[in-house]
């Protein structure tokens, strides 16, 4: 499969899928509290996704049994929601979700702290998020894909973190996973040339300790080999001539993302913001 360039109609649908997912993440993040089971998180998230007229992209994807990947502490990604697993004060929890809206997918992940968390955990979450923004400084037409990968790793390396190598980001559109594969770690070659209309899910997964991960016997849950904490931050972006347009941020996230961005600014018009409001009924 080759890398698809989206038409303006497709881009509009992906923007809508993105705005809805941003809202789902915001709403779901606000529901998290100690004592809640990870299955409750999944149920709430699935209800929210359906309330916006979307399908959960992950449900039954290659047999994945839930709508939201809920990964706690040393779980990196693809944690399977369970009635037995309850969140407790001090945990960190990564929520990864995808929505399909009128045939087009968006994909995003956030890591949240439950109540008071350690300073080490707080920094890991913040720096994992920032590694995404460092990477997408290079996400513009004419640049090469691996400039993004290299920038993510260069930033994470400053803190001695382990950048997960066994899972990658990906192109996205009418399929959840499309070409290209997007490593979050340093690459030898340049990778493909970025072109306007490409839509990409960039998703650094970063561990306090070793980069090595193992798969649990459930065939899904990925955990750190040394049981150190792991965080995940993902957005779906659109490549434009002048820089990345991040499709899966809320308006307040867009407003708050300025100071962290030392490179190109985001391109979200007043009209987009208005559409998002109508979409989410807020
Ligand atoms: N963001 C993850 C990914 O791109 C989510 C996929 S989970 C699955 O791989 F359950 F859908 F596989
Ligand atoms: Co993804």
Image: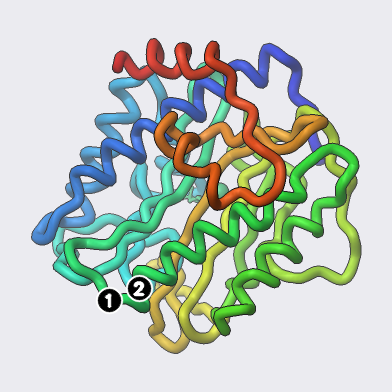
User: What residue would you read off at disc 2?
Assistant: 121
Rendered image: mark on residue 108: none
Residue at x-position 87% and y-position 71%:
188
Q: Position of residue 257 (x, y in %)?
A: 51, 44
Q: Position of residue 41 (x, y in %)?
A: 23, 47
Q: Position of residue 210 (x, y in %)?
A: 53, 85
Does dot 1 land on a helix, a strand or a loop? loop
The quadrant in which the N terminus is found is top right
Residue 33, quarter of the rendered image:
bottom left
Horizontal side, residue 29 vs residue 187: left or right: left
Q: By what rule are the colours in the image chosen?
A: rainbow
Residue at x-position 53% and y-position 65%:
205
For disc 2, the neighbor class at 10 Å (few under 14, some 14 to 19, many from 20) is many
For disc 1, the neighbor class at 10 Å (few under 14, some 14 to 19, many from 20) is few
In depth, the one of 185 and 54 nearer the eye is 185
Answer whether labels 1 and 2 touch (C-beta < 8 Å): yes
In depth, the one of 44 and 25 nearer the eye is 25
Residue at x-position 15% and y-position 63%:
86
In depth, the one of 45 and 257 nearer the eye is 257
The answer to whether one can see residue 220 in this image is no
User: What residue would you read off at disc 1?
Assistant: 118
Horizontal side, residue 96 vs residue 205: left or right: left
Q: Position of residue 211 (x, y in %)?
A: 57, 80
Horizontal side, residue 182 vs residue 66: left or right: right
Residue 70, quarter of the rendered image:
bottom left
Does dot 2 land on a helix, a strand or a loop? helix
Q: Is residue 29 above or below residue 92?
A: above
Q: Is residue 19 above or below residue 200?
A: above
């Amino acid at each position: 499969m080759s890398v698809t360039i989206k038409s303006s109609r497709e881009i509009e649908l992906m923007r809508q899928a993105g705005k809805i997912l941003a809202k789902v993440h915001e709403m779901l993040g606000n529901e998290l509290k100690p004592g809640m089971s990870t299955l409750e998180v999944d149920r709430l998230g699935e209800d929210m996704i359906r309330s916006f007229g979307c399908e959960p992209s992950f449900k039954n994807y290659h047999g994945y049994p839930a709508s939201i990947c809920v990964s706690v502490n040393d779980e990196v990604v693809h944690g399977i929601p369970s009635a037995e697993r309850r969140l407790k004060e001090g945990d960190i929890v990564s929520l990864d979700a995808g929505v399909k809206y009128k045939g087009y997918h968006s994909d995003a992940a956030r890591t949240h702290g439950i109540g008071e968390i350690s300073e080490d955990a707080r920094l890991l979450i913040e720096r994992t998020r920032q590694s995404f923004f460092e990477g997408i400084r290079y996400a513009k037409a004419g640049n090469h894909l691996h400039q993004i990968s290299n920038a993510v790793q260069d930033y994470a390396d400053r803190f001695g973190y382990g950048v997960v190598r066994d899972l990658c980001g990906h192109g996205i559109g009418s399929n959840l996973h499309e070409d290209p594969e997007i490593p979050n770690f340093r690459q030898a070659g340049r990778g493909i040339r970025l072109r306007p209309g490409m839509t990409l899910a960039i998703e650094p997964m970063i561990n306090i300790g070793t980069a090595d991960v193992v798969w649990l016997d459930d065939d899904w849950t990925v955990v750190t080999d040394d049981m150190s904490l792991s965080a995940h931050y993902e957005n779906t972006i659109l490549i434009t001539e002048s820089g990345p347009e991040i499709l899966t941020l809320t308006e307040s996230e867009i407003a708050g993302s300025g100071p962290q961005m030392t490179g190109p600014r985001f391109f979200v018009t007043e009209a987009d913001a208005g559409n998002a409001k109508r979409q989410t009924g807020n």
